[in-house]
Image (tube, grey):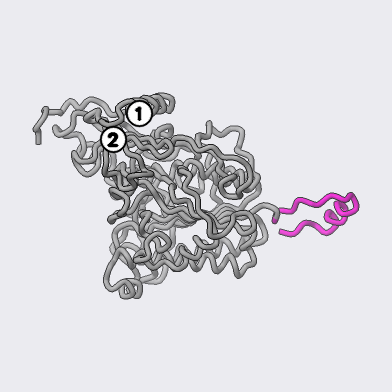
């Protein structure tokens, strides 16, 4: 958006540079669903992701970026700059509804019941979209929201409560965002979509392609003003239903075929940014909402587990002229840090009525200017997943050290990630003082966050039950 000629001349006469809207960087935030740390080519040469790899070459890679172990908590944290524990949104919002969800989980096998959680992102939380919008940005959301109520599987269109959708949280445009945690419809990922926030396309249209088109349309329409485009892909979440040509290219591997489709979408968005001449003034962020569903070796575990394979995710920033290309940092950062970091980068103030932001801006890590002090990162998942093997737990990473506290057994595991990336050597017995100190720190953090904790299970039948 060009400044008025007369105003420009006036500033020139005064010897002052005018502050045009184009001084503000655009932000394109690309969030992929269920994409693991080892599901991208720059990490794993066995996976072909040329567009993502190009982004990695042109920007800075964060090797130690963390999300929550499942999707909804990460998404709420990105939106607000607050942790899932504080938000009381610590697990995926169940499509089957809470009654059935808790019925499935509250059984004699567990001493503790799952902690309570909320079923949507409350409207009194100030979102990153609202912050950008207040600064004059156009804001658009495209894809998966999963912060708008439980029981979406019982709906024909994912509409549990439209009052909780992206357009009520600061987005001017919403295409596809509702209560769904994954695509629905009889041809999931292909039109008709059975999604009340996106019009069906021609029969057989592919959802990832359509959302890419909508993102490109938004960027193009707002090329002359600052914009915040949030491209939240439904892929590569199940059902693994890739486009036929991508399935063929992947030799029938559905998981890889989904990754190929994701990479093509990223490439199309980058091409649009470049062709519109927006490259130098656009911050592009690429990341995932949790660990991958397949093996993430050398990391231990995958989605749903407390090990790094379940919570460490790809993260890349591209910002020409501000972020040096072909660089990396191994400083740990969390998904609640996006809110303050991106606002800081854009020179946008956090709205005064926002609740306390727990994230910290790591802009100095991006630009190389200023100091940044790493601090502990915490996880809280007071829920059951995958049976007794992975019950409720909380964890903390402080420097190279990581401690996992299992609620059910009150046992801990301690790892040194610098020496043991695969978390195979539990040092809790060898270093009891360190383990005790980290557990104390973690429990104090949970207290400060007023985190919901597991409750005694009245149905517990004792050891050996079930």
Local crowd size for mark 2, using a 10 Å CA cut-off: few (<14), some (14–19), many (≥20): some
Q: Position of residue 149 (x, y in %)?
A: 37, 42
Q: Position of residue 155 (x, y in %)?
A: 32, 50
Local crowd size for mark 1, using a 10 Å CA cut-off: few (<14), some (14–19), many (≥20): some
SS of the residue under disc 2 = loop
Report which residue position mark 2 lands on. Answer: 427
Q: Position of residue 130 (x, y in %)?
A: 57, 43
Q: Is residue 78 above or below residue 431?
A: below
Quadrant where the C terminus is found in the figure: top left
Left or right: residue 63 compared with residue 434: right
Do labels 2 and 1 touch, CB within 8 Å?
yes
* Residue visible at 60% across and 40% down in the picture: 371
**Residue 209 falls within the magenta-colored stretch:** no
Which dot marks residue 434?
1
- Rounded to the nearest angstrom, the CA distance separating label 2 from label 1 is 9 Å
* Residue visible at 28% across and 56% down in the picture: 294
Query: Which of 11 and 42 lies nearest the eye of the viewer?
Result: 42
The residues colored magenta run 1-22
């Amino acid at each position: 958006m060009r400044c008025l000629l007369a105003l420009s001349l006036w500033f020139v006469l005064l010897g002052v540079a005018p502050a045009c809207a184009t001084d503000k960087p655009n932000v394109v935030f690309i969030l992929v669903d269920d994409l693991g740390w080892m599901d991208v080519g720059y990490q794993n040469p066995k996976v072909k992701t040329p567009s993502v790899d190009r982004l990695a070459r042109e920007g800075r890679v964060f090797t130690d970026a963390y999300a929550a172990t499942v999707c909804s908590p990460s998404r709420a944290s990105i939106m607000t700059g607050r942790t899932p524990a504080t938000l009381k949104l610590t697990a995926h919002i169940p499509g089957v509804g809470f009654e059935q969800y808790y019925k499935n989980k509250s059984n004699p096998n567990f001493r503790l019941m799952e902690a309570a959680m909320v079923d949507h992102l409350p409207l009194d939380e100030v979102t990153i979209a609202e912050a950008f919008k207040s600064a004059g940005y156009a804001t658009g959301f495209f894809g998966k929201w999963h912060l708008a109520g439980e029981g979406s599987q019982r709906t024909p269109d994912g509409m549990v409560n439209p009052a909780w959708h992206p357009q009520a949280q600061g987005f001017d445009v919403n295409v596809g965002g509702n209560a769904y945690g994954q695509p629905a419809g009889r041809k999931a990922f292909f039109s008709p979509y059975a999604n009340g926030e996106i019009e069906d396309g021609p029969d057989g249209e592919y959802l990832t392609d359509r959302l890419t088109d909508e993102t490109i349309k938004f960027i193009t329409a707002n090329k002359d003003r600052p914009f915040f485009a949030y491209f939240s892909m439904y892929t590569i979440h199940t059902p693994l239903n890739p486009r036929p040509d991508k399935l063929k290219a992947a030799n029938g591997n559905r998981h890889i075929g989904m990754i190929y489709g994701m990479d093509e979408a990223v490439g199309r968005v980058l091409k649009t940014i470049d062709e519109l001449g927006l490259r130098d003034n656009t911050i592009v962020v690429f990341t995932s909402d949790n660990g991958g569903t397949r093996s993430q070796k050398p990391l231990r575990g995958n989605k749903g587990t407390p090990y790094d394979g379940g919570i460490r995710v790809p993260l890349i920033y591209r910002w020409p002229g501000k972020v040096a290309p072909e660089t990396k940092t191994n400083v740990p950062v969390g998904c609640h840090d996006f809110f303050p970091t991106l606002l800081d980068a854009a020179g946008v103030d956090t709205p005064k009525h926002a609740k306390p932001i727990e994230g910290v801006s790591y802009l100095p890590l991006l630009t190389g200017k200023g100091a940044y002090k790493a601090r502990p990162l915490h996880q809280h998942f007071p829920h059951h997943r995958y049976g007794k093997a992975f019950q409720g737990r909380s964890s903390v990473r402080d420097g190279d050290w990581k401690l996992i506290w299992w609620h059910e057994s009150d046992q801990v595991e301690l790892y040194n990630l610098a020496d043991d990336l695969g978390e195979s050597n539990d040092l809790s017995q060898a270093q009891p003082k360190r383990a005790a100190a980290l557990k104390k720190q973690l429990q104090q953090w949970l207290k400060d966050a007023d985190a919901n904790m597991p409750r005694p299970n009245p149905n517990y039948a004792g050891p050996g039950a079930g």
